Image (tube, grey):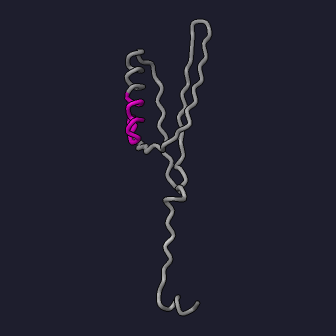
Amino acid sequence: MSEKTTFEYAGKMTNKVVSDYLSRLAEAFRYKEFEIQGLGKRIHFSLEKTVRFELKALSKENEGEIQLEISWKEDMMPAEKLEIIPSITESNENKS
């Protein structure tokens, strides 16, 4: 069973700082390998070819909220990459 590591951060920051974080995250997605670190934790990510992207937005008078969720699971190995190699020995050949 794999180890689960979580990292959460919430805090007030300027629009510019948020924009910088989102830009760095977007750039990291181009490379498909990146880490998030802070508060004494580090999480390494290896992205799959396809991810699930969810965006929720809420706007009320004098307040708003945007939630982003990006998730993925390791793809199943395609059949063309699956290789079955029989182990043939002299003793196995004589049994047939």
User: Which is more toward the observer, 66 or 90?
Assistant: 90
Task: Determine the image quadrant of residue 69.
Answer: top right
Return the x and y of residue 85 as percentages of the image width and height.
Answer: 49, 73
Return the x and y of residue 71 as percentages of the image width and height.
Answer: 54, 38
Q: Is residue 34 magenta?
A: yes
- Region in magenta: 24-40
> How many marks on residues?
0
Which quarter of the rendered picture does the C terminus lie within?
Answer: bottom right
User: Which is more toward the observer, 58 or 6?
Assistant: 58
Q: Compared with residue 16, is residue 37 higher up or lower down, i.e. above or below? A: below
Return the x and y of residue 18 as percentages of the image width and height.
Answer: 42, 21
Q: Compared with residue 8, is residue 78 higher up or lower down, i.e. above or below? A: below
Q: Is residue 11 magenta?
A: no
| Residue occupying image coordinates x 43% and y 43% | 45
| Residue occupying image coordinates x 37% and y 29% | 24
Is 11 positioned to the left or the right of 52 in the image?
left
**Residue most extreme to the top:** 61
| Residue occupying image coordinates x 42% and y 42% | 43
Task: Determine the image quadrant of residue 23.
Answer: top left
Return the x and y of residue 83 as percentages of the image width and height.
Answer: 49, 66
Is 34 positioned to the left or the right of 94 in the image?
left
Whether residue 41 is visible to the viewer of this picture, yes or no, is: no
| Residue occupying image coordinates x 55% and y 25% | 67
